[in-house]
Image (cartoon, helix red, strand yellow):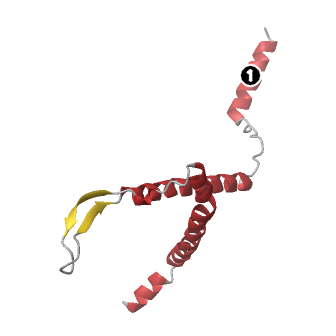
């Protein structure tokens, strides 16, 4: 069983997947930093410094953990959700632009399509047609 597990773990696909996950995590950190540190500040400036993270809806109260403390409000933090949604949309758009640019750079110029050579039957039929036209 250990030999089978070792063979499975050392397969190329598993190693490729592990490398992809690690690179993906590192790339995710880069994209998050780009969005939070470079893209969101100008957007925040454009919308007047709006921060949705403070928006919430109180739906009740939870008794305090220790006696003598005020009850703890139970809230739905929809503002945090809005911030995460905006971040996701920006990240998705930036990734779209990156993939689009990369595919334009790597796209090879395709040679114009050359029509295929006619088959022997087509050549023979063409000759017969031409001979019939000449004999008219």
Give the farthest residue toward the bottom. 2
Q: Is 14 situated above or below 54?
A: below
Give the farthest residue toward the top. 136
For the point 74% across and 37% down, the residue is 115
Give the farthest residue toward the front. 68
Question: For residue 8, which quarter of the picture?
Answer: bottom left
Give the farthest residue toward the right. 134
The crowding category of the residue bearing disc 1, from other C-alpha atoms within 10 Å (few below 14, some 14 to 19, many at least 20), is few
What is the x, y in percent for residue 11?
51, 80
Q: Is residue 74 left or right of residue 16?
A: left
For the point 76% across and 48% down, the residue is 109
Number of marks in the image? 1
**Location of mark 1 (residue):** 128
For the point 74% across and 19% down, the residue is 129
From the viewer's side, name the closer residue of 76 and 102: 76
**Judging from the image, what secondary structure is the residue with disc 1 in?**
helix
Q: Is residue 43 left or right of residue 122?
A: left
What is the x, y in percent for residue 116?
72, 39
What is the x, y in percent for residue 88?
50, 57
State which quarter of the image contains the N terminus: bottom left
State which quarter of the image contains the C terminus: top right
For the point 56% across and 76% down, the residue is 19
Q: Is 37 situated above or below 86?
A: below
What is the x, y in percent for residue 33?
59, 67
Question: For residue 120, which quarter of the picture?
Answer: top right
Q: Is 63 situated above or below 50?
A: below
Q: Is residue 135 left or right of residue 16?
A: right
């Amino acid at each position: 069983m250990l030999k089978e597990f070792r063979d499975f773990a050392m397969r190329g696909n598993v190693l490729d997947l592990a490398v992809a996950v690690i690179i993906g995590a590192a790339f995710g950190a880069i994209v998050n930093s780009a969005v939070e540190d470079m893209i969101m500040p100008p957007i925040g400036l454009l919308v007047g410094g709006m921060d949705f993270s403070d928006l919430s809806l109180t739906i009740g109260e939870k008794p305090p953990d220790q006696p003598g403390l005020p009850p703890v409000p139970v809230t739905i933090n929809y503002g945090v959700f809005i911030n995460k949604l905006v971040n996701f949309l920006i990240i998705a758009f930036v990734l779209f632009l990156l993939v689009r640019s990369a595919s334009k750079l790597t796209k090879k110029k395709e040679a114009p399509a050359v029509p295929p050579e006619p088959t022997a039957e087509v050549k023979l039929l063409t000759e017969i047609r031409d001979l019939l036209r000449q004999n008219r």
